[in-house]
Amino acid sequence: MDTAFSDTQPIYRQLRDRVIRLILDEALKTGDALPSVRQVAAEFRVNPLTVLKAYQELADGGLVEKRRGLGMFVAEGARAELMKNERERFLTQEWPKVRATIARLGLTPIELMEQPTLSAGGE
């Protein structure tokens, strides 16, 4: 995982978002353990309280569950809930901008479909 952070939002939110991406990409599946707070803090060179705050937000959202003495684990249904939320966010926030750009440029569905897709490494 990339260890660089941006200045656009707090580090704990960026950590939370990274875990969310791992769940969406199925790198973390239902029942999988999240890395320990100490492990993440050491890897990213951040305060353990920052990691704990990110994990707590995930727990508060029902995406992960705490197991006393064992750590944090991806909760049942977390990916489905995230997919639902991400789809809603895309359709309400991103798609209108994309659609407006497509219309402004006069692109046709055929032109769009003929474009090669970028690989995950090329984005």
Image (spheres, rainbow, N blue to C red):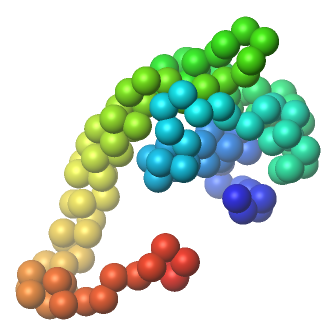
Q: Quadrant of residue 84?
A: top left
Residue placed farthest to the top in the image? 68
Residue 39 at what x, y percent from top left?
85, 39
Residue 15 at what x, y percent from top left?
68, 43
Residue 58 at what x, y percent from top left?
57, 27
Q: Is residue 36 above or below residue 119?
A: above
Q: Is residue 83 left or right of residue 42?
A: left
Q: Is residue 70 above or below residue 77?
A: above
Q: Is residue 26 above or below residue 49?
A: below
Q: Is residue 72 left or right of residue 3?
A: left
Q: Is residue 37 left or right of residue 95?
A: right
| Residue 10 visible within the image | no
User: How many callouts does the rendering have?
Assistant: 0
Name the residue at 76% across, 27% down.
52
Name the residue at 48% across, 31% down.
30
| Residue 92 visible within the image | yes
Name the residue at 70% across, 59% down.
1
Name the residue at 47% across, 52% down.
25
